[in-house]
Image (cartoon, helix red, strand yellow):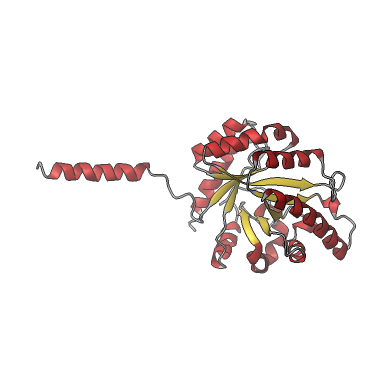
């Protein structure tokens, strides 16, 4: 009996260790959080947001913002680094009324200043208001896009940053158009960021699109998907997302996947939990 007791204690200890170990972060691999700063009914402070990510076991996120968040960006990024959470990208949005080659809005300039001040090494996710390309023929739009991305690329290079082109609808939201810009700038380190929630009108040719995007694809933001929407739906509540994710994996995509907040009137922690549980439920 004396010889058996240590063995029993060892087995119980191993069981206890297994029960306390966190589950695998995702059935599809590396995960990050997206759309969690302005989309949060609790309007968390930087300290509260980093604590939330720590609780959820999410160790990287993409930083989106509104002008009211600009003064606290540097503080939040320092807090994230101290907690071992990676700021994997920073959002940048261009509007024809305020942004052009050689002249950016005061908000975008503040982002640049903060990136320089903190020396954060990350990606910039860039996209455009529809007014930036409105009324232009395709060739003119490509030319204008190339000129603007070339300018941003030069500034990014000086800080050791990379640029991801983000599909946010309209002309620039078509990955084929983004790829034309990438091909025209072979000396820039550019990639694609593809978001399901901005891709409802691309579902009919999604697989063909993935085949085209794959060599350039850096990150994919997930969402529950139905042909007719709604735009934002928890993962697992749609009828398309499982097949869309499966196709990406079958074609060899091995990059990270984003889990959305993006519901302004709800607690973003609850929204993230729902999406994490929904993703797990897909059984991929």
Q: Is residue 224 left or right of residue 142?
A: left
* Residue 201 higher or lower than 264, as above or below: below
* Residue 137 higher or lower than 103, as above or below: below
**The N terminus - image quarter:** top left
Q: Residue at x 51, y 40 (%)?
A: 56
> Between residues 10 and 190, which one lies in front from this camera angle?
190
> Between residues 8 and 227, which one lies in front from this camera angle?
8
Q: Position of residue 74 (x, y in %)?
A: 65, 35
Task: Decide if residue 231 is in sight here.
Answer: no
Q: Residue at x 55, y 61 (%)?
A: 254
Tell me the quarter of the picture where residue 207 sits.
bottom right
Q: Residue furthest front?
A: 158
Task: Decide if residue 92 is in sight here.
Answer: yes
Q: Is residue 160 left or right of residue 170?
A: left
Q: Position of residue 188 (x, y in %)?
A: 72, 60
* Residue 210 higher or lower than 42, as above or below: below
* Residue 208 higher or lower than 198, as above or below: below
């Amino acid at each position: 009996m004396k010889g058996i007791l240590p063995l029993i204690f060892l087995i119980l200890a191993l069981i206890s260790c297994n029960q306390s170990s966190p589950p695998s972060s995702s059935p599809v691999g590396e995960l990050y959080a997206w759309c969690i700063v302005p989309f949060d009914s609790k309007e968390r402070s930087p300290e509260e947001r980093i604590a939330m990510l720590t609780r959820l076991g999410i160790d990287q996120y993409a930083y989106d913002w509104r002008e009211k968040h600009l003064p606290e960006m540097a503080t939040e990024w320092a807090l994230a680094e101290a907690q071992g959470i990676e700021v994997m990208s920073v959002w940048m949005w261009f509007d024809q009324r305020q942004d052009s080659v050689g002249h950016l809005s005061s908000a975008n300039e503040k982002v640049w200043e903060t990136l320089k001040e903190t020396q954060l090494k990350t990606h910039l996710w860039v996209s455009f208001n529809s007014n930036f390309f409105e009324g232009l023929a395709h060739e003119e739009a490509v030319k204008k896009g190339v000129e603007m991305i070339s300018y941003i690329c030069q500034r990014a290079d000086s800080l050791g940053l990379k640029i991801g082109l983000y599909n946010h609808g309209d002309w620039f939201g078509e990955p084929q158009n983004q790829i034309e810009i990438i091909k025209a700038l072979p000396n820039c380190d550019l990639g694609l960021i593809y978001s399901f929630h901005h891709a409802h009108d691309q579902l009919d040719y999604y697989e063909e699109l993935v085949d085209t995007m794959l060599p350039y694809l850096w990150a994919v933001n997930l969402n529950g998907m139905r042909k007719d929407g709604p735009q934002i739906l928890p993962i697992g509540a749609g009828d398309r997302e499982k097949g869309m994710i499966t196709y990406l994996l079958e074609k060899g995509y091995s990059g990270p996947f984003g889990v959305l907040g993006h519901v302004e009137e709800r607690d973003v922690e609850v929204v993230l939990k729902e999406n994490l549980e929904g993703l797990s439920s897909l059984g991929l």
